[in-house]
Every structure is written in C-alpha cells, then in structure tokens.
Image (cartoon, helix red, strand yellow):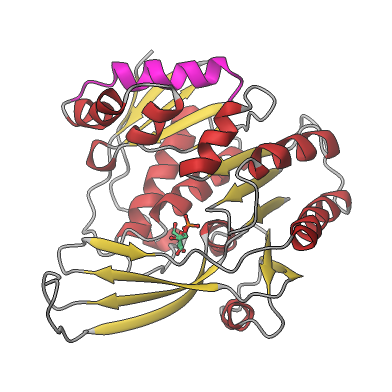
C-alpha cells in the first residue's frame, strides 16, 4: 500500500508566456492549463500512472473543484480519500517561460481548524488500519507526507504524524517532503521524528545540518563543480540522527543519495526543460517505485532522477508515465 497525505492541496493553474516574463507590462498568454495538484496528490498520480495503487488523503470542501478534477483524470490505481473541511483547495499559479523558467505563486491555502486537523489524522490512521502491513517483506509499504502546512496547522505536525504512523504501523516506510518551518520542526525533533526518506535541495540540506547560510548556499555551487564531499557530509549528519535516506536534489548537478550503507551521485538526464512543477514529487514517486520493486540505492536514485527529469520535460503539472522517461538514464557513481 502507498498512502500520501497532502494537507494543503491545490488546483494548479499554469500559464505559458511567448517570451521572457516582463514585469510591469501586459503580456498575452500562449496557453493555460488547470490540473489538480499539491505534492502528495502528485506523488499518488505518478504512482498510479505507473501501475501502482495509491491512496491520496487530502482535506477538501463539499463540492470542492479539486475532487472533480481528480475524478476527471480517471486513473484506475488512484483512490482519493477526501476529508471534509470548510475551505476549498487553493489555486496555485505557475508562470512558465519558453526557456523552461518556472515561477510559482502559491496561495497560503484555507486554514484547518483543530477539529479538521484531528479528522485528517484520523483518516490517515484509519486508512492504515484497514490495510494489514506484512513486516519485512517486499513490496514495502509507504506513507508520503508532502507539501506545505496550511494556516492553523502546527509547524511540528509532520513530526507528530511520523510518531503516530510508526506506532500504528511498524515496518511502514515514511517519506516527508516539505520545506521551511515544517522541515526545521521535523529536524528539531530527530531522532523521534525520523522518516525513511527526505528530499532536500542543497540549501535546505545545509539548513537542516545547521550550517551557516553562506555554507548552505555553497553546497549546491560546489556540487556543480563536482565537489560532492560537503553534501555527503551534511547528509550523513542527518542519517546519523536516524533518517533512513537523504536524497539531495542539486538541479543541473543531479542528485546525491546518502544512506547508512554509503553515498551515490546521479547525473541529471538531459531533457528539454518545459515546466519544473511536479519534478520533485515525481522523483519521490520514482524512488518509491524502485524501492517497492526491490531496487538497491543506485536504482532508487536513478529511477528518481528519471521520473523527475521526465516531469520537467512536460508542461504545467503534467506528470510522467513510464513512456515519458528519458531515453538516456542518469549515470550513477558510488561516492563512498
Ligand atoms: O505550497 P506547497 O505545498 O509547498 O507546494 C504546492 C505545489 O507548488 O507543489 C506541487 C509541485 O511540487 C504543486 O502541485 C503545488 O502547486
């Protein structure tokens, strides 16, 4: 079973420009696409695109347009488990330029009340309770907690959920993909809050590892020049605090995966970049797909890169199917 939670889902409106964005002018759009999104929703969509059953838990209002949009996708493997709340999903806007530059303008989202937060927690645990999880056997079961937290939700909610999920389902693998305060709050409660997978970028990794801002920024710059040592050291600190796998996305420099068993680098497959929206979510889905198929670290990393690059080559929040994967996969090298 693969379960995703998206506390702050969105309808993603992607508008395409004929040329570079010119601030302060009127520009005519060449295209507008609207798709159901939010990070956990995207992960579940990629998994079901690839033939894996996935359940997406998300708060949604009565007659919420996101539910109709998800239904219209007609994905056979996707089960949507909405938790009834007052506020409808936000609308997030992405502006894409012909060179692939993507600017995201994300709303804060409708707030959740204490009762609504409790209802989402209940839905998550109930979904788990209705699926028995064999421990230590393939395929692995995953819960993916993804995206920002809407107003009203305590910043340490993901940390709390990791604890609740571990208690409810020993053996379940947990991925947390978030940023800013919720990510810092997760780090503050390690090792109790330790997930099996996180996917920071270079700067986030530096912040998590407690590096000063200039050294955190320098991690990604160093990686572009082929210097992965500082990235591996910072990720190792987090693995030492109980996180199973740290997959660091480094843009054009590819990605580094660090686990207790070693460190690997994967190059970024060469694809024409159209819209990077959903690329990170697709890489999380790729990692999980390889994991449930019994893949080792190198396969998990290269599958993550393949799905992430495929997403970047597609418009808006269009998410990849196996047919969209790049012809030439990443080159994976063991670093240590
Ligand atoms: O505001 P958040 O929750 O951090 O991110 C939301 C979002 O930008 O993430 C997805 C792409 O990763 C989009 O579908 C969605 O609009």
Splitting the image into 4 quarters, where does residue 124 fall?
A: bottom right
**Above or below, 34 relative to 53:** below
Q: Nearer the viewer, residue 296 or 196?
A: 196
Residue 140 seen in render: no
| Residue at image coords 25%, 69% | 96
Please name whichever residue, 110 or 304, is drawn nearer the observer in this view of the structure.
110
252, above or below 86, in the image = above
Q: Nearer the viewer, residue 334 or 220?
A: 220
Residue at (73, 71) in percent of width and height: 85
Q: Position of residue 107 (x, y in %)?
A: 45, 67
Residue drawn at (46%, 17%), measured in percent from left and top? 236
Q: Is residue 91 left or right of residue 63?
A: left
Q: Position of residue 191 (x, y in %)?
A: 65, 22
Specify start and end residues of the magenta stretch as a single range.
226-243
**For the C terminus, which image quadrant?**
top left
Q: Is residue 84 magenta?
A: no
- Residue at 27% in and 42% down: 251
Q: Is residue 12 left or right of residue 42?
A: left
**Horizontal and vertical percent position of residue 327:** 29, 52
- Residue 57: name its quadrant: bottom right
Considering the whole magenta stretch, tell me its main secondary structure. helix
């Amino acid at each position: 079973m693969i379960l995703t939670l998206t506390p702050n889902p969105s309808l993603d409106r992607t508008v395409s420009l004929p040329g570079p964005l010119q601030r302060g002018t009127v520009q005519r759009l060449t295209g507008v696409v609207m798709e159901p999104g939010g990070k956990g929703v995207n992960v579940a969509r990629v998994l079901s695109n690839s033939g894996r059953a996935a359940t997406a838990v998300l708060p949604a209002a009565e007659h919420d347009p996101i539910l109709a949009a998800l239904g219209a996708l007609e994905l056979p493997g996707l089960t949507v488990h909405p938790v009834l709340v007052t506020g409808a999903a936000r609308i997030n806007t992405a502006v894409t330029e012909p060179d692939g530059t993507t600017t995201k303008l994300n709303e804060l989202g409708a707030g959740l009340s204490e009762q609504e937060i409790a209802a989402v927690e209940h839905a998550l645990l109930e979904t788990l309770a209705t699926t028995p999880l064999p421990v230590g056997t393939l395929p692995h079961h995953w819960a993916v907690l993804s995206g920002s937290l809407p107003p009203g939700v305590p910043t340490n909610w993901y940390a709390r959920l990791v604890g609740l999920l571990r208690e409810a389902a020993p053996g379940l693998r947990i991925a947390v993909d978030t940023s800013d305060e919720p990510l810092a709050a997760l780090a503050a409660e390690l090792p109790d809050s330790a997930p099996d997978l996180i996917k920071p970028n270079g700067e986030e990794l530096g912040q998590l590892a407690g590096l000063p801002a200039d050294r955190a920024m320098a991690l990604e710059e160093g990686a572009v020049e082929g210097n992965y040592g500082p990235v591996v050291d910072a990720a190792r600190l987090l693995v030492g605090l109980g996180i199973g796998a740290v997959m660091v996305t480094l843009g054009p420099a590819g990605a580094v995966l660090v686990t207790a068993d070693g460190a690997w680098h994967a190059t970024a497959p060469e694809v024409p970049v159209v819209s990077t929206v959903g690329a990170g979510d697709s890489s999380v889905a790729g990692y999980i797909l390889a994991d449930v198929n019994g893949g080792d670290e190198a396969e998990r990393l290269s599958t993550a890169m393949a799905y992430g690059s495929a997403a970047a080559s597609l418009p808006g929040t269009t998410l990849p199917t196996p047919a969209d994967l790049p012809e030439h996969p990443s080159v994976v090298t063991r670093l240590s």
